[in-house]
Amino acid sequence: MNYPQIRVATVQASPIYPLDRDRCVDKICTLLEEAAREKARLVVFPETFIPAYPNFSIDLSRPTEWQYTLRQFIENAVEVPGPEMSRIARLAAERGINVVLGVNEKVAFHEGLLFNTQVFIGADGRLLGKRRKLFPTNREKVFWGYGGAEDIQVFPMDVGRVGGLICYEHLQPLLKYATMIQGEQIHCASWPGWPEYKGGRSNRHLIDAASRQYAIEAQCFVVVSSIYVDAEKVPPGLLGNAAWGFFGGSGILNPLGEYLAGPVYGKEGILYAELDMGLIPLRKTSIDPTGRDERWNILSLNLFKAPVTAVHLKPPPGEIAAPHEDAQRSEAILERLERIEKLLAKLAQAPPNA
């Protein structure tokens, strides 16, 4: 089998301040043009790059201010699919480049609903899909809704099988495994970059450790993309009590957890690296937690892929169930049959009792 060399890029940049969705899309297109000139086949952008990471919280001394700030985010968020994504997709097709982009996603007919979303666009300009952050953490719960089971997926691109997680999702062991087990070859890790507070904690080590660990556990390449913001260039008092000065931390790692590029702090830029896809099977000769070395008969993960909605319309007695309900039952039955078949095959290979 021929294992290709894949050139990838990770963007470390600042969104546009004050919030401006259209100018942010302009900047994304400019960065994609630059990466295309450098022959990158996959370009990864940070978490919530459109229009920005909502780094503010409820201020009890001004208890209603956060509502108007959140409304600004909703007004500058994007629908997926939508006109902004279509513009980026057209450019991706023109340049033959795959794109993974973090956005604040709004939903038609639900004016107050936002999601933290990764968008996956193929080199042919097709919107391959999206995944919404499954676990908003801390004050993020004020801004974003929760993703669903349908958001645990890996997308086939012409560069390989590409998946992603957002920020602290990299600290969720079951979610990580559910993504890895789908055969990820390139993992896109989207982070906000967080501000560093004087006399407070820094999350530089967290991004570094979580990204290295993911590469080592999954035996895949990890492309880390994080926001960088120069606090001095942000208008004073923007978004109330929000803190700025995001440090970055972007980089590209191989399946051994070694940096091929980065990590980079304190500046904007695009990092590039050549991925030798042959390193993945080479690494798996030592340890393969999602293949040869997994023990599904002892430790297993139940992944419920059917989407969950707030309203379920059940048919009256005597009527045929909705097709999606039959499909869910059939899928569950097939999964049980597959487990039984594996167990029977294993028993058949066991030596007879003496």
Image (tube, rainbow, N blue to C red):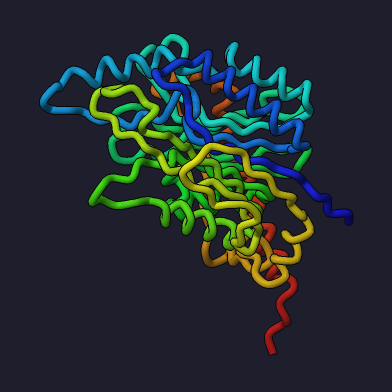
Counting the numbered discs, the total is 0
Residue at far bottom of view: 354
Left or right? Give the position of 78 relative to 294: left
Quadrant where the C terminus is found in the figure? bottom right
Q: Position of residue 83 (x, y in %)?
A: 59, 11
Determine whether 138 is above or below 50 in the image: below
Viewer-nearest residue: 309 or 313? 309
Within the image, what quadrant is residue 220 found in? Answer: bottom right
Determine whether 191 is above or below 33 in the image: below
Q: Position of residue 212 (x, y in %)?
A: 54, 59
Residue 348 seen in the figure: yes
Within the image, what quadrant is residue 57 found in? Answer: top left
Q: Position of residue 321 (x, y in %)?
A: 54, 23
Residue at far left of view: 61
Quadrant where the N terminus is found in the figure? bottom right
Residue at image x 72%, y 17%?
A: 90
Viewer-nearest residue: 262 or 323? 262
Determine whether 37 is above or below 221 in the image: above
Viewer-nearest residue: 164 or 182? 164
Residue 316 seen in the figure: no
Within the image, what quadrant is residue 67 found in? Answer: top left
Q: Position of residue 7 (x, y in %)?
A: 75, 44
Residue at far front of view: 232
Viewer-nearest residue: 165 or 318? 165
Residue at image x 61%, y 18%?
A: 85
Residue at image x 39%, y 16%?
A: 74
Residue at image x 63%, y 64%?
A: 256
